[in-house]
Amino acid sequence: MFESSNLGLSTRGNVATAGIVQRTEDSHPLVHIRSLVDSLFDEAQAATVKWAPLIRAALLQALYSFSTDEHLLEQLRYNALYRWFVGLRDDELLWRESDYAGALAAMRSDSSATTLFRSAANAAYTYAVLVPGRFRMDSALIESWARAPAPSISNSPEGFRSDAARTSRLDRARAAILRRVSDPTLDADAVAAELHMSRRALYLLFERYGLTPTRAIREIRLDCCLRMLRDEHHCHRKIADIAMDHGFKHFASFSRQFKMRYGISPSAVLPSIAKSEPSSRRGEMDLRADGLR
């Protein structure tokens, strides 16, 4: 079904480009997740690393809630970023629709592979919840993978306990940001104070996931605004008011960041009920979005 030799990444064609693999703060979240997962593979035994493409494929399916195995495999045929994430070369496809589920079952029968899979799921889940709005995540599935005890847990190294402690601190950091998401003065120092840790410790905590506290605050604020704009109970409010209620100081800056993150203007995500309002109201919303164009 697949061999460990398939882990190589071709740079021919459009499967891998500098834009995909460049790992910067603003690169695609999948680049950061693959880096986290690959660091786990680097420390694993060679016999376990053969499962790496399958583990990445399973994570991809959960991160984007692909409803069926067929849907996942179809995406892997045509999406260059997804193919790079899994580690496929050119037109290579490691599984047929009939044997992908069987490959997953075989992987889970290998205790060392299950332990590795749990660690990978934990890393992916922790990062994904810190950049809300970037995935259509099957949270229940991936969290069950991340939290479920592995068959060999009794023999697991001390590192698993430290991973759990790190995840707990990240969850607390996210909760602290959400509690003060409306505060325009919220910054890394304020979050560190809430968690009773130093600024350096906070940056080191986020650094493992390719984030900074500032970026995490921005991502969470944008996601809160996106959710409220989609909510019919709030869609009649001025977009600027929603932005200010979530800590943005300037509407033009919010609009620019929103479009950079989601590829559309804030007014474009309003439910149809809001878009059917009189033209004067729509014109007001369009004017407020002019900074995006």
Image: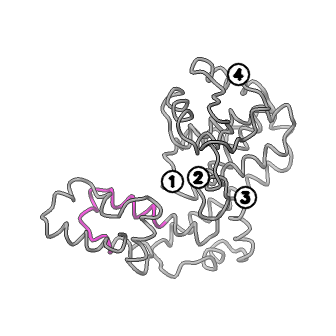
Q: Residues within 10 Å of mark 1 (few under 14, many from 20)?
A: some
Mark 4 → mark 3, Cα distance in angstroms: 35 Å
Mark 4 and mark 3 lie on one chain; the one further toward the N terminus is 4
Q: Which residue is mark 3?
A: 166
Q: Nearer the viewer, residue 11 or 247?
A: 11
Helix, strand or loop at label 4? It is loop
Amino acid marked by disc 1: Arg
Tag 4: amino acid: Met
Instruction: Choose the circle earlier in sequence order: 4 or 2.
Output: 4
Numbered mark located on residue 134 in the image: 1
- Extreme top residue here? 98
Stretch of the chain drawn in magenta: 221-240
Say which residue label 4 marks.
1
Instruction: Answer whether labels 1 and 2 touch (C-beta < 8 Å).
Output: yes
Q: Earlier in the sequence, mark 3 or mark 2?
A: 2
Q: Position of residue 183 (x, y in %)?
A: 47, 78
The percent coordinates of residue 41 (x first, y second) are 79, 43
Left or right of 238 in this view: 247: right
Q: In the rendered view, how is the structure colored?
A: one colour
Is residue 151 in view from this perspective?
no
Among the 4 quarters of the image, the one containing residue 115 = top right
Could you tell me which secondary element the residue under label 2 belongs to?
A: helix
